[in-house]
Image: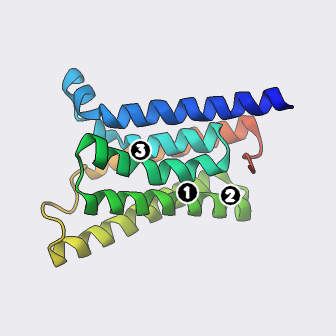
Amino acid sequence: MKTKLIINISSTLLLDAIAVLFIIYMGDISRLFGYPVYILDPMRMTLILAFAYTPRWNGWILALLLPFVSYFLGAHPSITKATLMAAELLLNVWLFWFLIDKTKMALLSILISIVFSKVVYYLLKFICIQIGWLSGELITTPLDIQVITTLSFSAFIFIVFLFNGKPKRK
């Protein structure tokens, strides 16, 4: 039992370390591939992997950690946008686990949680732009890419939960 717990914690920490390193070096990775990797929503991708393979608490940690690691160590985005991103990801985590507990339907839960958290993010971002806390365009990632990533993440969670059964309660 103790060995299994150590292995679970180790795999969780490994995912977290890889996620943090990926976020820190995302600019360099984008230059290496000649493609803006941030457009594929890597923070949410990390959350999706956490939902699928780590205990529930890890999603909360990543949702809070990744945007601020990006700000403090990667110097991007601004603190206002990092806060908005953290709020979006935290809402995504809460809503996903709330819906999965109520409906037991992974596909519906992940799809609604992603879409709803994005809507709230864009609403808050719009308010921040109007107030003057942020500048630039409201939507910087093309909507077609957002639809594709949302559907891909949802399909992934559906397949993982279909074959792995019940989600982790810890």
Q: Which residue is mark 2?
A: 100
Q: Residues within 10 Å of mark 1 (few under 14, many from 20)?
A: many
Q: Residue 93 — which label?
A: 1
In the picture, which quadrant includes the N terminus?
Answer: top right
Say which label, 1 or 2, has the lower sequence index. 1
SS for callout 1: helix
Q: For marks 1 and 2, give the CA distance.
A: 11 Å
90 vs 69, left or right, is right
Q: Amino acid at mark 3?
A: Met
Say which label, 3 or 1, has the lower sequence index. 3
Residue 147 at x, y percent in the picture: 38, 49
Mark 1 and mark 3 in contact (Cβ < 8 Å)?
A: no
163 vs 36, left or right, is right
Residue 111 at x, y percent in the picture: 53, 55
Q: Foreground residue, 90 or 36?
A: 90
Say which label, 3 or 2, has the lower sequence index. 3
Q: Residue at x 58, y 62 (%)?
A: 94
> For residue 122, which quarter of the picture?
bottom left
Q: Residue at x 18, y 70 (%)?
A: 133
Q: For marks 3 and 1, give the CA distance.
A: 12 Å
